[in-house]
Amino acid sequence: MSVLLSVDNLTKKFGELTAVDACSFTVEKGSITALIGPNGSGKTTVFNLITGYLPSDSGKVEFAGTSIQGQSPGTLYRKGLTRTFQQARVFADLTVQENLVVAGGGSWKNLFGRRITADDRARASELLDEFKLSHVADLYASELSWGQRKLLEFASVLMSKPRLVLLDEPTAGVNPILIETMATHIRSYNAAGVTFLIVEHDMSFVMRVCDPVIVLDRGKTIAAGDPLTVQSDPRVLDAYLGD
């Protein structure tokens, strides 16, 4: 496999706090890579730096061999790099179908005029079926359960047929049945060519779904490898269990 995402010596400080400290790792094309670490290890900050929600203080990020430093989230989305958030971000005052159309780049003017294009409607319908959300397509997103909102956000980032999806805590607050649904969708889209980088606290999920696993501690990469190797690495055990 070839490298799709490269993070090199990425650093971010907030005042005196160094949240990300010369962090380096790569994500191979076609992989389902996990990014794990104790609370406060810098995982979400790394996601924010990669996806343009925060500027880095130093270091480099390359996507598909090209620097993406300083590019906006919207620009990266159009290039095929997108993400979800710990707290599902959906448009509460739009319907489920409208959320998907907007995520796919549909015109707000057309949306509010209820002139959704045939292509947008077809793609949205396809995802609604896949994520078993067709029965709530006309409900406002505010009416959905927490798990349904997580599914809607996941479906939304797939509207543009991305190359790399960053999932931030996809199973947080989700019941066991929906966790398995998430795992099934990740595996299915990965088999179809989508690469995933996943921040996740559920180690059972990580061990079942992800390979390789990258471990952060205090903003630095301390280990990387297959799940079993990482699980038994003394540095990882010390990061999670040490003082």
Image (cartoon, rainbow, N blue to C red):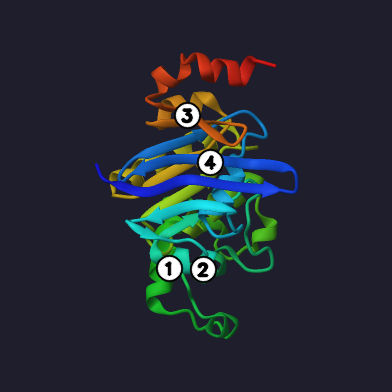
**Foreground of the two, 58 or 194:** 58
* Label 4 or label 1, whichever comes before in sequence order: 4
Does the CB distance between marks 4 and 1 fall below 8 Å? Answer: no
Q: How many angstroms separate mark 4 from mark 1 (CA)?
A: 28 Å
Q: Tag 2: Cα neighbours inside 10 Å, few (<14), some, or many (≥20)?
A: few
Q: In the image, which is nearer the foreground, mark 2 or mark 4?
A: 4
Q: Which amino acid does the dot numbered 2 rest on? A: Gly
Q: How many angstroms separate mark 2 from mark 4 (CA)?
A: 26 Å
Q: Residue at x 70, y 16 (%)?
A: 243
Q: Tag 1: Cα neighbours inside 10 Å, few (<14), some, or many (≥20)?
A: some
Does the CB distance between marks 1 and 2 fall below 8 Å? Answer: yes
Q: Tag 4: Cα neighbours inside 10 Å, few (<14), some, or many (≥20)?
A: some
Q: Which amino acid does the dot numbered 3 rest on? A: Val
The disc at residue 78 is 1
SS for dot 3: helix
**Percent coordinates x, y for residue 216 in the rendering:** 54, 32
144 sits to left or right of 208? right
SS for dot 2: helix
Q: Which amino acid does the dot numbered 1 rest on? A: Arg
Q: How many angstroms separate mark 4 from mark 3 (CA)?
A: 24 Å
Q: Which amino acid does the dot numbered 4 rest on? A: Ala
Q: Residue at x 50, y 66 (%)?
A: 71
* Label 3 or label 2, whichever comes before in sequence order: 2
Q: Tag 3: Cα neighbours inside 10 Å, few (<14), some, or many (≥20)?
A: many
The disc at residue 206 is 3
